[in-house]
Amino acid sequence: MNDSTTFLIVRHPFERLLSAYKDKLLYAVPHSLHDKLGYKIVKRYRKKKKNVTYPKWPTFSEFISFILDEEKQKHVLDMHWTPITKFCTPCQVKFDIVAKFETLDEDQRYLIKKANLDNVIKPEWKNSGKGRNTQELVSKFYSELTREQLDGIYHLFRFDVELFGYSSEEYFNLDLVTNEPSSEYKDNVD
């Protein structure tokens, strides 16, 4: 008899990618691995390389170009921006519960009850997601991308999108950059 409950927590892959960018690169701890990676991305993708100091972090578009190039070259991606289907193998492991970040409060209560832990675990939310609307952030950052970049990201994450019942339609309906990716820092970089 197996008393364990297996579970996986997923998030819309495009939101997860944006969250990873913000957490690991935009707000990187100085001199950390991700801070150094950010500097490397800026050096590789920034058009005017002589002014790498502002901003020192990569734009979202530069980050996406980096991921797509790394994937094309068959390099191993950082776990924070690797598709879930590539490192959690949900088709090989029979998870009892697949919880979604978007409904985590409700899914967490269900998981605790199913695992018979409701007398042991009392969830406490430290960060309930208050602040800037996720949709606003998605629109702001993803509208910096070109259609080619968005197609590449969809291709990379398509199994996550399809397997976990997400849609990418809203991303493809954004006003995307037509030629060269832009950023709010472009004037300061050129």
Image: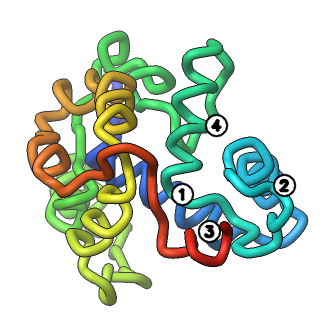
Query: Of the residues under marks 3 and 4, which one precedes in the sequence?
Result: 3
Secondary-structure class at tag 4: loop
* Residue appearing at x 39%, y 36% in the figure: 149
Q: Using the numbered discs, state the Cα–Cα distance from disc 1 to disc 3 in whole angstroms.
A: 6 Å
Query: Of the residues under marks 1 and 3, which one precedes in the sequence?
Result: 1
* Residue appearing at x 42%, y 57% in the figure: 18
* Residue appearing at x 62%, y 30% in the figure: 77
Q: Using the numbered discs, state the Cα–Cα distance from disc 3 to disc 2 in whole angstroms.
A: 12 Å
Callout 2: few (<14), some (14-19), or many (20+) C-alpha neighbours within 10 Å? some
Callout 3: few (<14), some (14-19), or many (20+) C-alpha neighbours within 10 Å? some
The answer to whether residue 10 shows anywhere in this view is: no
Identify the residue under disc 2.
36
Q: Using the numbered discs, state the Cα–Cα distance from disc 1 to disc 4 in whole angstroms.
A: 11 Å
> Residue 147 appears in which quarter of the rendering?
top left
Secondary-structure class at tag 3: helix
Q: Are marks 1 and 3 in contact (CB under 8 Å)?
A: yes
Comparing 149 with 95, the one in front is 149
Amino acid type of the residue tagged 2 in the rendering? Lys
In the rendering, at what x and y percent does residue 154 appear?
A: 29, 30
Identify the residue under disc 3.
26
Comparing 109 with 60, the one in front is 60
Amino acid type of the residue tagged 4 in the rendering? Asp
